[in-house]
Image (cartoon, rainbow, N blue to C red):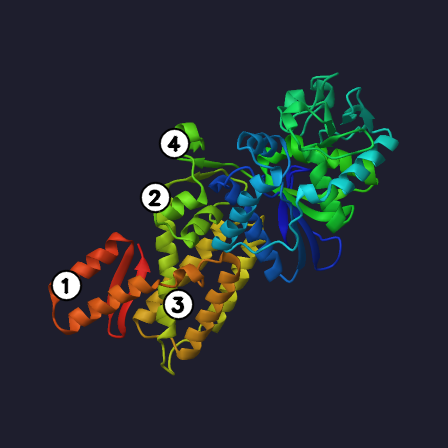
Amino acid sequence: MIKFYNTLHRKVEEFTSIKDKEIRLYTCGPTVYDYAHIGNFRAYLFEDLMRRYLSFMGYKITHVMNITDIDDKTIRKSIEEKKTLTDFTKKYVEAFFEDIKTLNILPAHHYPKATEFIPQMIEMIQVLVDKGYGYTTDDGSVFFKISNFPDYGKLANLNPDEMRTGSRIESDEYEKAEGRDFVLWKSRKPEDGEVYWDSPWGEGRPGWHIECSAMSTHYLGTHFDIHCGGVDNIFPHHENEIAQSCAATGDKFVNYWIHNEHLLVDNKKMSKSLNNFHTLRDLLNKGYSPETIRYTLISTLYRQKLNFTFEKLEASQKAINRLRELKRRLETVSSNSGIDLQNECKTVIENIMKILGDDLNISGALGVLFTWVGDVFGLLDQNKVSSTGAQNGLELLDKIDTILGVINTQSHDIDSSIEVLIAKRETARKEKDWVLADEIRNQLLEIGIILEDTPDGPIWKKK
């Protein structure tokens, strides 16, 4: 049984896909007005962990992640930088794809850009107008009439009657108390510059919320399995998505709404003014490895606030080092006698998958994994593992890494300059030049590389 916390019903529910062993998944992607920060990647990595787990459990997944390249922020910043919207957003779209590759995030099957779906948005808005859910204003804008949609507020647990009435909200983001009629199409304004399209209501551009409804239903149909995002998307974005999608299509839209909690830095909200704002690139420039960042951001249950600290990064690197060291030790086993670990590995993988099936309980799964790791190290120290057992252990680590994505990563490969230093140190040791050997060891340590001398030669790991 697989269970997830469904925000729509505010409880953990058994997961059942619409089609047997097939899942249609939509996840909120980046708004490309800046580099994505680690709070954004907390969401993308939780979704990656979920997708990897469901794939491991035998589901065929169709994953769509949108790219918001038109909204208030992208337009404002493109005008500030005196660039076309396309030229401005291109830089951050490319950076996003570089970043998800760096973090070993599985690519979505479709990455629709909002600017590529304007005709579909106009078509959906026209349907809403024709059905009486949308109305036009004197300036040529179109708004969604919430009073005509009785279920409004169910996702965010709001009472529409308690919200500010008689108001219309044209901005993309706003507070709960302000959420009344929201914009579907914005008439052309001077502050939008040259960003506009023709429509039946005049020149303008879509509101933020209609973008995801048009793109998700285009690829996944009017009723699909899972929609993910951060808790900050619940209102107004996802609430408005439900209203306009259900009203336009008459279908259910989404069965499971799954949201991750916020990321904090040293128990504070991440903010540039507090000097605790980090992008992935910031952390890489400080010398932290991609897999360390990935491990840190996935190792806390997605529904709990994640308190990010540099101490956690260091602990994550040690955990990864331990997994890699176990892999290295297992690869050296050649004995025909000893334990084959078959039953142990079978039990461990079953327990880990069962725990992950309970609302993606990653911390519990990691607890089981590292208990097994400690046990196998103990057996290896006593030479009690056979070559068959070592192979079974390696296969288990490979299976686990299809979900964790931190053991067998390209960033574990050592670059050529470090290889040269290690080879130079080996030459110094053979020539008994201990002073030079120690100097090189310290030089490597300064750049975060720890060497360990073994009978089979030196091995290295990141600090």
Residue at mark 1 to residue at mark 3: CA–CA distance = 31 Å
Q: Secondary structure at mark 2?
A: helix
First in sequence: mark 2 vs mark 4 = 4
Residue at mark 2 to residue at mark 3: CA–CA distance = 25 Å
User: Visible in this render: residue 155?
Assistant: no
Residue at mark 2 to residue at mark 4: CA–CA distance = 17 Å
Task: Judge from the rendering whether residue 331 lies leftward or rightward of residue 74; answer left or right.
Answer: left
Contact, mark 2 vs mark 4 (Cβ under 8 Å) = no
Question: Type of residue at label 1?
Answer: Leu
Q: Which residue is mark 2?
A: 311
Question: Type of residue at label 4?
Answer: Asn
**Rendered image: mark on residue 275:** 4
First in sequence: mark 1 vs mark 4 = 4
Task: Judge from the rendering whether residue 297 lies leftward or rightward of residue 184; answer left or right.
Answer: left
Q: Secondary structure at mark 3?
A: helix
Q: Which residue is mark 3?
A: 327
Q: Which residue is mark 1?
A: 436
Residue 289 point in image, percent of width and height:
39, 53
First in sequence: mark 2 vs mark 3 = 2
From the viewer's side, name the closer residue of 294 and 10.
294
Residue 414 point in image, percent of width and height:
35, 63
Contact, mark 2 vs mark 3 (Cβ under 8 Å) = no
Question: Type of residue at label 2?
Answer: Glu
Q: Secondary structure at mark 1?
A: helix
